[in-house]
Amino acid sequence: MRRILFLQGFCEEVDDAVQEVFIKVYRARLPSEVTFLGWFYRLILNTGRDQGRRRKTRYGTLEKLRQTATAGVADAPVEPLDPALRRALAGLTPELRECVALRYFADLPLDEIAAAQEVPVGTVKSRLHGAVKRLRETLQESGFERDA
């Protein structure tokens, strides 16, 4: 959850967003086991989006997230990402960044990502394809070499 909120790039304080997610889960009427994960990830994404709407400027938040990534987070740290990868992720649109976070950091299957983002599976596939292509191009432009 922390990684998704962190990589989503919307929330000013990851810990506040995590706490808000748990409060919402505690207060909610939980769905059946079959639909729980989709519901839970949609709740995480929506909480991150809500947090993002509350901040005054997008650039202030991105700077705060960069500082957090390099400083680490107490207790359950978000693993610091390579600076080139962080910059490449910051260059993606919010929807693409969410897709990447859910697929590669939360390891969700495509259908659960679609449920969380409330879009068709084909849209998720398209977003992931575009995001990976853009990340690859950005990393190559910054001189990042892929290991063989």
Image (tube, helix red, strand yellow):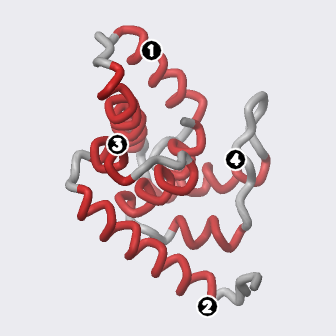
Q: Is disc 1 surrounded by few (<14), some (14 to 19) or many (20+) residues within 10 Å?
A: few
Could you tell which of marks 2 and 1 lies nearer the N-terminus?
Answer: 1
Q: In this view, does 59 lie above or below 76?
A: below
The residue under the point 71% across, 89% down is 143
The residue under the point 38% across, 76% down is 130
Question: Helix, strand or loop at disc 2?
Answer: helix
User: In front: mark 2 or mark 4?
Assistant: 2
**Residue 23: image tag:** 1
Q: Could you tell me residue 104's position as x and y percent?
A: 55, 56
Q: Is disc 4 surrounded by few (<14), some (14 to 19) or many (20+) residues within 10 Å?
A: some
- Image quadrant holding the C terminus, namely bottom right
Q: What residue type is labelled 1?
A: Ile
Could you tell which of marks 1 and 4 lies nearer the N-terminus?
Answer: 1
In 3D space, how far apart are the residues under numbered discs 2 and 4 (Cα atoms)? 25 Å
Could you tell which of marks 1 and 3 lies nearer the N-terminus?
Answer: 1
**Residue 68: image tag:** 4
The residue under the point 46% across, 81% down is 133
Q: Could you tell me residue 5's position as x and y percent?
A: 51, 42
In 3D space, how far apart are the residues under numbered discs 2 and 1 (Cα atoms)? 42 Å
